[in-house]
Amino acid sequence: MSPPLVLHVIHHLVIGGLENGLVNLINRMPPSHFRHAVACIEDYSDFRNRLTRPDVEVIALHRSVIGIWELRRQLFKLCRRLRPTIVHSRNISGLDAVLPAFLARVPYYIHGEHGWSTDDLGGRGMKAAFLRRVHSPFVDRYITVSRHIEHYLKARVGIADSRITQIYNGVDTDRFMPALARTRQILPQGFADASMVVIGTVGRIQRIKDQETLIRAFAALSHEPAFANRARLAIVGDGPLLGHLRELVASLGIAPNVWFPGAATNVPDIMRTLDVFVLPSLLEGISNTILEAMATGLPVLATAVGGNPELVQEGRTGRLFQPRDIGTLAKLLGDYVADSTLRQNHARNARAVAVEQFGLNTMVRRYEAVYREAPRR
C-alpha cells in the first residue's frame, strides 16, 4: 500500500523562505511515511530542481492567465486525479484550494500561515481577514510559523486555539555552519582584509525588506571618523528596488564600500564571509535568513517585528531595533564593529541556539505529527 499523499498548494515555487521550507520538508521526510505533490497557483522556476525526490509532481496552474474560476476547476480535477489524503495550502492565495478540495472530498485540509503580502503588512486589511474567516469552516488544522501569526489567527480571524499548531521553520545546520577556516576569496577587492568587519543582509530587494534603512545606517557609521575604513556592507539579492539602492549608495558616497552581488546560489559561502547579519524588514513571519545566519554563527541585528523577537535573543544572540530607526541601527552596528569579543560571544550563542532549537529534523517531526492526524482511506 502506498504512503498517504500530501498535496501542497503554494503561490509559486521560486526562491523564497516559504518555498525553501517546503523543499526542505519534502526532501527530509522519509519517503515511506508520506508522498508529496506541489500545485503552484501561478508557476515555478528552476528552484523546483532543489526537490531531490524524483516522485514529486509539480504542477503550474497560472491563475493570472486562466482566472480564478478556471483555477478552482483545475484544482478540483487535480484533487480527483491525485486523490490526496491531505491538502496543505499556504498563505492567502493557497485558500483558492479550499472549495475544490472540499468538493473533491479530500479527507483532511491543513492551511499554513507563513507571513504577509507586501500590500497587507500584518494582515490588517479587512479583505484578507474576511477571506480567512470565510474559508475557516473547511480547514481542519492551521499551522503557523510564529506565535505572532498564531495570535493574529486567534484575535483577528477568530480561530480557536485548539485548531492551531505552531511550528518554527527549520534550518539545515550542516549546510549553514561556521567556516572551518576564515576565507574571503569570493568577496570583492577591499572587503577581504582580515581586519575588515563585513556586515551583510540577504533577501529580495523590495519594500518590505527595507534594505534602504540598512544602507543609510551604514552610511552614518562610515562617516564617523572612528569607523571610516573599518567596515564593509554586502547586500545580497535581486528585486525591483535594486537600481534604486545602487543610486542611493552612490548619492551617499559609500559605493566603494558596498557590494551588490545580486541573486546568489552560494548563499552559505557568502554567509561565512560575514561578521554581522542584519535584517531590517518592516515585517516578517519567521525569517529563514535569520535562522541561516544564526546557524552560520553570526550575531543578528533585526527589527522587532513579527516573529523576529522569537528568534533573536536580545543581548545574547543579537540585538533588536524598531523599523526604519536609522540612528539606533547605526549605533548597534558601531558596537559590533568596535568590539570583536561581543561579536564572537553572540556568534557562538547564535550557533548553539540554531542547533538546539531550530534544526530541520525537529521541524520535520512536528509536521509529520500533524499529518498523522489525518484520517486514512
Image: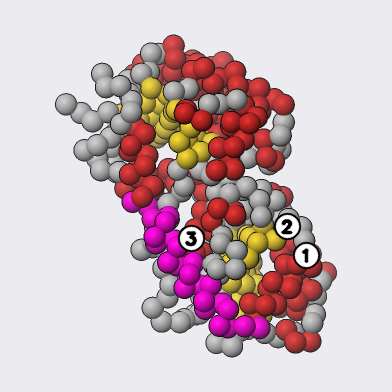
How far from the left and from the top, in percent, is residue 195? 59, 88
Q: Secondary structure at mark 3?
A: helix
Q: Which is the main secondary structure of the residues drawn in magenta?
A: helix
Name the front one of labels 3 and 2: 2
**Residue at x 55% of width, y 43% of height:** 147
| Separation of marks 3 and 2 at Cα, in angstroms | 22 Å
Residue 326: assigned label: 1
Residue 292: assigned label: 3
| Separation of marks 3 and 1 at Cα, in angstroms | 24 Å
Q: Give the colour scheme shown.
A: secondary structure
Where does label 2 land, which residue? 322
How far from the left and from the top, in percent, is residue 334? 70, 77
User: Is 145 in the magenta?
Assistant: no
Q: Is residue 250 visible?
A: no
| Separation of marks 1 and 2 at Cα, in angstroms | 9 Å
**Residue at x 36% of width, y 18% of height:** 107
Near mark 1 (Cα within 10 A), the count class, few <14, some 14-19 or many ≥20, is many
Badge 3 or badge 2: first in the primary sequence: 3
Tag 1: residue type?
Ile
Q: Secondary structure at mark 1?
A: helix
Tag 2: residue type?
Gln
Name the front one of labels 1 and 2: 2
Q: Is residue 95 left or right of residue 230?
A: left
Against 192, residue 106 (above or below) is: above
Q: Is residue 25 visible?
A: yes
Residue range (magenta): 338-361
Q: Is residue 120 left or right of residue 370?
A: right
Image quadrant holding the C terminus, namely top left
Toward the viewer: 46 or 315? Answer: 315
